[in-house]
């Protein structure tokens, strides 16, 4: 089985000033060592590099070198796998977004959702409720208790 995380968890885990820092860091530490595979979309990793180093997005932005080291450390873990678009991605994207009004800030979320669909990754951990519109995804907020 595999799962993915959204960029917000990566950002919280690396921002010691974030109120969610401890929980996000623990979540990544516990879930990146297996047995399930942690799948990280390249769009998620690139968003992390952009936002973690952006002075308007964080009161204490990381240097480019530190942000890149964080990504490299994640990718070096044995149960972590990066995801890229494969042949036919556009068709998957169109299928995932059919019937939805996807524009502006929704586009990166739709991109990630389509990437997860293409790779049969069923679960996304995020605290972004916008992903709930993708019915095929099991969207889990790691900061909330699981409901039965």
Image (spheres, rainbow, N blue to C red):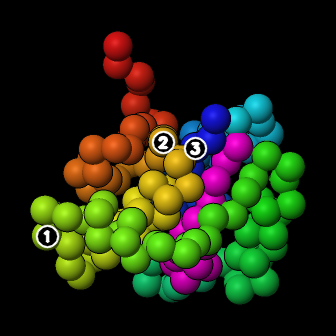
Foreground residue among 86 and 100: 86
Q: Which of 80 and 18 is in front in this view?
A: 80
* Residue of label 3: 3
Nearest to viewer (mark 3 / mark 2): 2
User: Tag on residue 101?
Assistant: 1
Q: Which residue is drawn at the image coordinates 58% and 43% (left, top)?
A: 3
Residue at mark 1 to residue at mark 3: CA–CA distance: 26 Å
| Residue drawn at 13 percent across, 70 percent down | 101
Asked if the residues shown at circle 3 and circle 2 are in contact, with their CB atoms under 8 angstroms apart, the answer is yes
SS assignment at label 1: loop
Q: Residue at x 35, y 13 (%)?
A: 148
Task: Name which quarter of the figure residue 16 lies in.
Answer: bottom right
Q: Estimate the x, y position of residue 113 in percent, counting from the top left.
A: 40, 59
Residue 99 seen in the current view:
yes
Quadrant of the image occupied by residue 57:
bottom left
Whole-percent x, y for residue 136 in the image: 34, 44
SS type, badge 2: loop
* Residue extent of the magenta highlight: 37-51
């Amino acid at each position: 089985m595999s799962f993915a995380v959204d960029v917000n968890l990566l950002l919280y885990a690396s921002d010691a000033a974030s109120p969610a820092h401890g929980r996000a860091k623990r979540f990544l530490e516990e879930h990146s060592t297996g047995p399930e595979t942690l799948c990280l979309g390249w769009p998620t990793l690139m968003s992390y590099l952009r936002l973690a180093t952006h002075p308007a997005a964080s009161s204490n932005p990381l240097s480019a070198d530190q942000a890149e080291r964080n990504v490299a450390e994640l990718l070096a873990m044995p149960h972590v796998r990066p995801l890229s678009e494969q042949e036919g991605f556009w068709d998957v994207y169109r299928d995932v977004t059919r019937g939805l009004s996807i524009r502006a800030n929704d586009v990166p979320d739709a991109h990630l959702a389509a990437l997860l669909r293409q790779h049969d990754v069923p679960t996304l951990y995020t605290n972004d409720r916008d992903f709930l519109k993708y019915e095929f995804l099991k969207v889990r907020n790691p900061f909330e208790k699981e409901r039965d």
